[in-house]
Structure formats: C-alpha cells, structure tokens
Amino acid sequence: MYEEITHPCVQHKLALIRDIKTGHKEFRELATEITMFICYEALKNISVKEVDVETPVGTAKCHKINEDIVVIPILRAGIGMLDGILSLIPSSRVGFVGLYRDEVTKEPVTYYERLPPQVEGGVCIVIDPMLATGGSTVAAIDLLKAQGAQQIVVVCIVTCPEGIQRVENAHPDVRIYAASIDSGLDEKKYIVPGLGDAGDRLFGTS
C-alpha cells in the first residue's frame, strides 16, 4: 500500500526542492522539512498510552507514544532525511544500512549494517529520498525482517510506479509514504521528473 501526501505545504516545498537552481544548503533544509510533514502522516496510527500530566492548575489526561521507533536511513542519501524525523521523535533509535549496486548483476549488495536491538519490537521507518527501482528498499526491508522486524514503513520524497510495484510484490505488508509519485524511470533508472541525484544535491558533490 502507498500514500501520496498532497498537502499544499508539502507540494510547495516539493516544487522548491525539485528546482535545478536550488543549492545544497537549501536542498538539505527542504529535505528535512518535507520529511517532517511525510512522517507526521506516516505515524498517525502508531499506538499511544494514556498518562496523567500535572499542569500548573490541575491534572490532565494525556497521551504519549507507546512504540519504540527505529529509523533506518539507507546510505548515503537517507542521511539527509534523518534530522526531519528526529525533530518529530527525538527518542527514536537509529540504524544504518549501506547498499551499492553490483555492476554485473545490477542487484543491491549490503556493505554496511548497524541496527539497534529494538528492531524486533519497534516500528521501523526506512528513509531514502528516492524510491526508484525499489531494489535497495527491498534489500533493506529483507534485512530488517531477517532481524525480526514486523512493523515497517517506508518514507521517501519521490517515488514512481516501478519502485512501488517492486516493494509491494516483495513486501505487501509494508506501507510507502511519499510526497510525489512521478511518472516513471528513464534509461538510466532515474526517476522522471524526480530530483536528480539526491545524494549529490544533498552534499554538494556535483
């Protein structure tokens, strides 16, 4: 399942982050802001517990999040979304997955993995600005499920039908949230119209 976040504030910022004239500083800021909006929607159904809170004038019945949240950026571009979700839920634990594409098989290969032990009982949020072919996302989900993860959500800024289909075929229980579902992939497997290379634009490496 997937959901496109069409809130006007998200779409306004999406227009800015797509712009070829947007530099890496503003790109990073926009990625953080867009991530906050998308994660706000992606986390709307997590469980809460009722607590009593003493205010200056009485006792209030309130609610606090009752889930362990584990955020997993796919390196390297996923790092650019991390501050956004940590601004919403600072108590989140963070794991990292590094993947590269094998030149012969064209399939993702894991080169780095560091996950907190709470993966098994937590809500795992996989973040990557671009869900293009879906190969890296599926590989990351495979890895998380092998560690016992049962609740997994994917948050990206831009995706396309090909990437969504690959994730849904492999993991129909995982929900995808994105600011835009673009038209498709070009011959180089870039999302069109997309953002360009999100990693390069985040870190100023091109």
Image (cartoon, grey):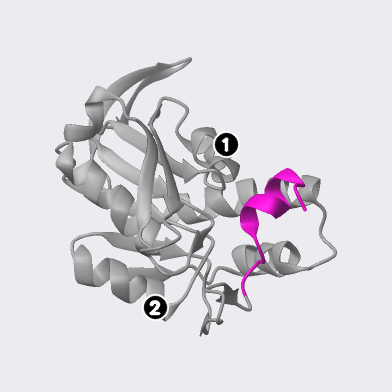
Judged from the image, the secondary structure of the residue bearing numbered disc 2 is helix
Judged from the image, the secondary structure of the residue bearing numbered disc 1 is helix
Query: Amino acid under label 1?
Result: Asp
Range of residues picked out in magenta: 194-206
- The relative height of residue 89 versus residue 188 in the rendered view (above or below) is above
Q: Is residue 199 magenta?
A: yes
On the image, the x and y values in percent for residue 162 come to: 39, 78
Would residue 80 appear left or right of 118 to someone viewing this image?
Answer: right
Query: Amino acid under label 2?
Result: Glu
Name the residue at 17% across, 33% down: 120
Query: In which quadrant of the rendered view does residue 60 lie?
Result: top left
Q: Which residue is mark 1?
A: 83
**For the view shown, which residue lies furthest in the right direction?**
21
Query: In which quadrant of the rendered view does residue 4 lie?
Result: bottom left
Would residue 12 appear left or right of 155 to someone viewing this image?
Answer: right
Mark closer to the chain start, 2 or 1 = 1
Tell me the mark number nearer the camera, choosing from 2 and 1.
2
- The quadrant of the rendering that contains the N terminus is bottom left
- The relative height of residue 152 versus residue 20 in the rendered view (above or below) is above
On the image, the x and y values in percent for residue 123 come to: 27, 41
